Structures are given as structure tokens and as C-alpha cells.
Image (spheres, rainbow, N blue to C red):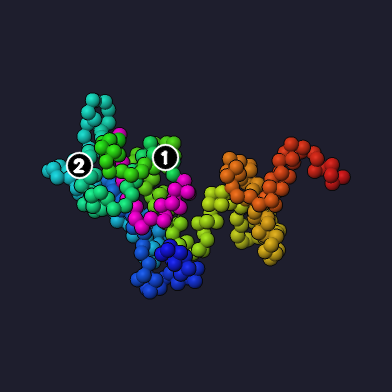
Amino acid sequence: MSRVFNKILAFFNLESGSFVRAIMQPMRFDIFTLFPEVFQPYLQTSILERAQQKGLIEVHLHNIRDYTTDKHHITDDEPYGGGGGMVMKPEPIFAAVESVLGSPPACPVVLLTPQGRTFNYRIAQEYAQLPALALICGRYEGIDERVREHLVTDELSIGDYVLSGGELPALVVLDAVSRFLPGVLGDPDGATDDSYALGLLEYPHYTRPAEFRGWQVPQVLLSGDHGRIARWRREQALLRTWQRRPDLLEKATLSGEDQAFLERLRSAQENPFQGDNDEV
Ligand code: ADE
């Protein structure tokens, strides 16, 4: 309900007023990491900085090391059973999360790990409906299994490769989720227009100059004919998706006109000389 209201306010471009800040609940992110300093530069830049200033998101960084109780502030230890690498100890992670979010934690707790389900725009959109989200960034070789079993509610991977830690993945999740919150993007429909949100890749973009090194901007974009421009963009999105990510077309919502366009693409591929003959 409040999200709908936010959307209305964002539509009328009212989100920058203090009135709006006073009545809108920001989405809260709690990030648990051994390296909080790596987040600051990104959080102080562009869209995420503005989202915080407008009171649309709140980001709280927590250093797991601050929750150790030993003299040397140790957060990792050797694995039981031997083997290489170090494992993140459970106590400081539980202490950090529970002292900030309660026990059990008051919001979903996501562990960033290559073993998680693969993050995508649908998960981002789903998380954007929540009032709060906690992200735990793993490091070292791994994290004590009891954290997964008894603290974490979801595990996310940002792709089939291994990074040095969960910090970059946490930023990816934070950024992608924030883009779905009303008012975060200047255009209220911004995130729904993005690639993937429509189930298609985006059409190509151009800006001034109309000619650069002899390369022209497509004439249709200069025509001022909004109907033709919309049609051209839709067809370019379909063409691009068909060329690069045909798997997305299976799930996309397509009109009769879209289907007909794709049919023409397919038959042009199967009969490459057909079009030439037609024109003769
Ligand atoms: N930590 C290390 N690699 C990761 C990945 N690919 N996704 C999420 N967390 C990670």
C-alpha cells in the first residue's frame, strides 16, 4: 500500500520534499561485512547517494569484527577435519546480526555466496517489496555451516564465478533492488523499462550529435513521430533479444504485432534471398 502511495508521489515528482521524507518509510539495508569501507565510495555516488538523501533507502554497515569478544578480534579459524583455507567463525556473525536485528532477525537475512540461487531482476523486484533486508558478506574459504543453517534465510550468487568476498555481490543486490523502489530513478517507470524487466533486451540508444564520424543516428529517431519511434524501438528490442538472448523470448509477453515481426525475422533467416526476390 505504501509502495503504491510512493509511486503516486514519485509520479508527481514530489519525492524530494521534506513532507514526503517525513511520511515515506525508507527501505532499510543492513550489511554485515569485514570490509565496510569498500561500500562507502559507491554509496556516495549517483543514484544510491540520491536515494539516501531523498530518504528512500537507508544503508547501515556493520563490521563483523566489532562483534568479536577475544583480545585479537579474530573472525576466522582453521577448518575442522583439516584442509587449506580459513573459515569464518559463527559467533561474531550471530552476535552482529542478532544485536542489530534481534533474535530471530526481524527481516530476511541473505548470505552472498557462489552456492546461492542466481540473482536476477525478479528476485530484485521481490525484495523491493520488503521494508528491510540484511546482507551477509562471506570471506575466506567459507563460512561456518551453522550460519547457513540457523541464521540465513536465503543464499544468493551473482554468477558462476568466485569472487574474493560477498562485498561486490552485496552492492549488486543493493543497487538492483533500490532501482525498483518508487522515486529512486528519476523516471517512475525507469526500472520497469530496463532490460529484463520487460522480458526483452533494451533497444539501442542514441544522443547528439546526429552524425558522428560519418555514423548517422537512425532517421526515425529524428522524425518526431512518436508512434513510429515506439514501433521502431519495440522492433529493435525484439531483434536484439532474438539475436542475443532468444531464451528470453519464450517467457516474454508478446503482442500479435510482436509475433508477426518475429515470424518475419525467422523466415528471413530461413530464406535469406526471399526478400531480395520480392523487391525485384
Ligand atoms: N562470493 C564470492 N563469489 C560470489 C558470487 N559469485 N556470488 C555471490 N557471492 C560471492
Specify the farthest residue to the front: 1
Q: Is residue 126 covered in magenta?
A: yes
Mark 1 lies on a secondary structure that is: strand
- Name the residue rendered at 36%, 43% in the picture: 154
Say few, some or many: other residues with alpha carbon within 10 Å of mark 1 (under 14 / 14 to 19 / 20 or more): some
Which of marks 2 and 1 precedes in the sequence? 2
State the residue position of label 1.
Answer: 117
Q: Return the residue nearer the eye: 33 or 30.
A: 30
Query: Relative to 158, is 195 on the left or the right?
Result: right
| Residues drawn in magenta | 120-141
Q: Quadrant of residue 139?
A: top left
Q: Amino acid at mark 1?
A: Arg
In the rendered view, would you say 142 is above or below 227?
Answer: above
Mark 2 lies on a secondary structure that is: helix
- Name the residue rendered at 39%, 39% in the picture: 116
Q: Position of residue 245 (x, y in %)?
A: 58, 42
Q: Position of residue 5 (x, y in %)?
A: 44, 67
Numbered circles on residues, count: 2
In the rendered view, would you say 117 is above or below 121?
Answer: above
| Quadrant including the N terminus | bottom left
Q: Position of residue 66 (x, y in %)?
A: 20, 49
Q: Amino acid at mark 2?
A: Glu
State the residue position of label 2.
Answer: 91
Looking at the image, can residue 10 be seen?
no
Q: Is residue 129 covered in magenta?
A: yes
